[in-house]
Amino acid sequence: MAKSKTGSFWLTEQVTLTDSTPVGGTIDLGAYVDVGDQQAVAVEQVDFIFQRQSGGEFSSVLTAVGTAPYFIDTQLSDLNPGDDIISADDNQLIASGSLMQGTDTWSHQSDLFPDLFGKLDEARMVVNDQLYLVGETNCDFAGTGDIIITVRAKCRIVKLSTKDWMAIAIQSTAADN
């Protein structure tokens, strides 16, 4: 069972898509995770925000970016995927999001994959010292600005039981090999 050591706080990271080359970023959790105390980070909520950046100005209006149809995919994981989107059945996937622009339509979706560890069963427990954000698109935004993907993760520091800590650590180690 997980017991909260702190209230909720927000961690953020962003990546910039300029063309169809996938990009990645990291959130450092080293100050929050402690093996000796079975201290982990519980990710309670993940939001993906898509913005256009042109000439140093940010905008949420994306209709002037690129040529439709296009998609933007993004994921948050707790093992380093390089700059690759990982399979949806990968145990290290914490959350994913997508934005699609059709000729006359828009579609956006995102999700979070929680663990089941007691009172915080709507959270994802992380024992690794980094979170990894990856974004990719099939569009070249040349001349129309770049797409900025910002991830905002609502987290708290928790203390896990020894059994829960070991279960998460073994799962994480197995996925790393």
Image (tube, helix red, strand yellow):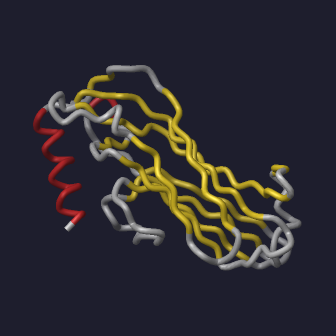
Residue 75, image x and y in percent? 50, 60
Which is more toward the observer, 154 or 52?
52
Taking the image as shown, residue 53 lies to the left or right of residue 76, namely right
Q: Quadrant of residue 43?
A: top left
Q: Quadrant of residue 121?
A: top left
Instruction: Look at the image and tell me in which quarter the N terminus lies.
Output: top left
Residue 125, image x and y in percent? 32, 41
Query: Looking at the image, which residue is at 56% across and 41% down?
Result: 12
Which is more toward the observer, 73 or 112?
73
Q: Residue furthest front?
A: 55
Q: Is residue 122 above or below residue 54?
A: above
Instruction: Look at the image and tell me in which quarter the C terminus lies.
Output: bottom left
Residue 53, image x and y in percent? 79, 56
Query: Looking at the image, which residue is at 56% across and 62% down?
Result: 74
Residue 4, image x and y in percent? 32, 23
Q: Is residue 40 above or below residue 18?
A: above
Q: How many marks?
A: 0
